[in-house]
Image (spheres, rainbow, N blue to C red):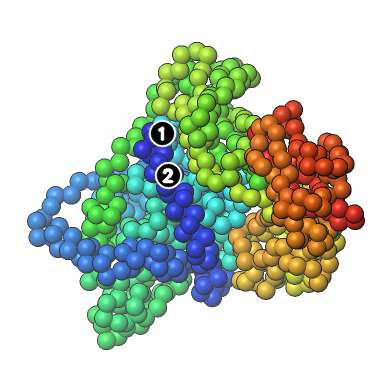
Amino acid sequence: MNKNTLFFFFLLFIFGTVLINAQEKTNFFKNLPEPVNGIIKCASDEYNTQLLKQYPEMMGSERFEETIQQRIQQISNTNERRLVVRLPIVVHVVHAGEPIGINSNISEAQVLSQIQVLNEDYRKLEGTNGFNTDPLGADTEIEFFLAQEDPDCNPTNGIHRVLRSSLPNGGGDIDSDIKPATIWDSSKYINMWVLQLGGGLLGYAQFPGGDPMTDGVVMGYQYFGSNDAAGVNIGGVYNLGRTTTHELGHYLGLLHTFQGGCGPQGDLVADTPFEAGPNYGCPSVIPDTCPAATGDDPIENYMDYSDDACMNIFTNGQNSRIQAVLSTSRSGLVSSDVPEIPLPEVSYDASLKILGFDDVCGSKVPNVQLTNYGTEELTSATINYSFNEGASTTLNWTGSIAQGVSTIINLPQIDGPLGVNILDASVIQTNTDQRVCNDSDSSVFEITEVTEVGAENLFFSITTDDYSDETVWEFTNGSGEVVASGGPYNGTSEDNTIFTATIPINEGECYSFVINDAASDGICCLYGLGSFELRENDIDGNIIFEGGNFDSQDNFSFVANTLGVNDYFSNNDMYLFPNPSNNFVEIKLSNTINLPDSFEIINMLGQSISKRTIRDLSDLNIDASNFSNGVYFIKLTKEQSFNVLRLVKQ
């Protein structure tokens, strides 16, 4: 990654963080329409209505529509010769750890069947389900293929498998956690995320002109691909891949055929008949819900809500709109240089990628992925890394990685400085690397102050929703040991029920809380009004963390400061200087006449490192030069009261 690109992401990280913090997290799931027969066919309107508030010139705005209509007219007036265009797709299979081919970790055959359906539908291929004899039926002259190279110039088959729980916040929110962590350059690739969606939702797509870090199509895995393909088994009436055809239509600029009902604008396409609302099923008698307008309802159009077996047409007018979008806001796809032929194999090809950072009570542990794309076994490599363009550190790796296999390496813990930082990392293979464009990576990350909880116990309460058997939660300490847990609950007798737990905590120790919902619809507010609360000490204590309206996961980390603080500490400003420190550190006090009685140094595991009685100001100096790098807690004592300061040793 070059420095200009990294600087762009650095700015994007800073201003993106400000934007996220300045606005309430967008969760359009709370605004979904009521399911019809347990199904919500599409949520693109609801999703893009919220996105339009942040991107006021995207599709849905007058400015966007003026541009598209002008471009449609230009194409019509000049009779521009169209060539068949082929667009690259990456399918992000976001799974829960199942074997390939089971549930959300869909098979390659299922993915390939969906690409085949898209090509049949968008090319109106004769002899397939996508063919029609309607004079208004269009061959859009668009074809799709699975990308054969990823953005880091690694070989790929276009199927990117991702364990959901490995993503930030456990992949709890699709837009905030899943998409930014997995997206490939949205100006060059059509990104499709296939995963478990809750609430009966089939899928949704982002209209052109929105956020490039969330751009693409989201599909429920049960509706992706075609049951007609060999080795693929998909049930129901949405089992022929037409939901993805529909959502990709939104991505390429199309609205629902029933948009605006019988009103004058409709779906902004002249040759699609008006209809008052969506059609479901496949009516044997075609309805005419707008009798004052010409034509029956377009139940065979891909942009209606009919059953998959009923759909088989994009109109010429819809195609004109798609072509206008491809020549403006999505022109990068047409000019994309992503190859569709597999990259040639080489003997030696080590690749390094920064996957992310584990949060250890405010500190960060970088995770880098070392992959062997060469045909020869990878047995040794040198990893160089640096922070904020400082001095480089070397880590020598040895092991055994076969072709196409990866291993995760944890770099040493980073304890500071606070704020935005940059990690640069690269790999050097012992043998001559024959593909060096994938050897290095850079990532922006932030270190923040850790949350401290002043309590001896945690009081946890949870109210389950209508599907309590989908919910599990647990608390773990800094060693990864589970100190409390609950669920899955009895889905018959324990729905909409309150459960509580009192959890003792140890001073100076780090704790993490995580709650998961198997259906990825949280515990509020689609199916009941579930919620959870974490309080200090008891039911009347201060609220530390609360929630309920999440997708698959919500979590929270903190350090326990169980020590009482009386007026002595409340009225005496105390801090450590310098902090972070790599040598000596001093306990600074605003009141240097009345000193604390003593202090104790405690490590992240809650173990006592040393204790000292404070007799005079010289006892407030700490020699940290022999401490291992990491986070420590300085426990100051005055009579029966205590206070804790956090020290970062570099």
Answer left or right for 137 relative to 546.
left
Which residue occupies 34% across, 34% down?
339
Q: Are marks 1 and 2 in contact (CB under 8 Å)?
A: no
Q: Indicate the quadrant containing the C terminus: top left, top right, bottom left or bottom right.
A: top right
Q: Amino acid at mark 2?
A: Phe
Q: In terms of secondary structure, where does tag 1 sit?
A: loop
Which residue occupies 58% across, 45% down?
418
Q: Amino acid at mark 1?
A: Met
Answer left or right for 636 relative to 646.
right
Q: Which mark is residue 379?
A: none
Please say whether residue 467 is visible from this viewpoint.
no
Question: Can you identify the residue that label 1 sits on?
Answer: 1
Q: In terms of secondary structure, where does tag 2 sit?
A: helix
Counting from the top left corner in percent of width and height, residue 26 is at 51, 64
Question: Can you identify the residue that label 2 sits on?
Answer: 9
Counting from the top left corner in percent of width and height, residue 209 is at 33, 58
Please say whether residue 330 is visible from this viewpoint.
yes
Q: Residues within 10 Å of mark 1 (few under 14, many from 20)?
A: some
Q: Indicate the quadrant containing the N terminus: top left, top right, bottom left or bottom right.
A: top left
Residue found at the far front of this picture: 593
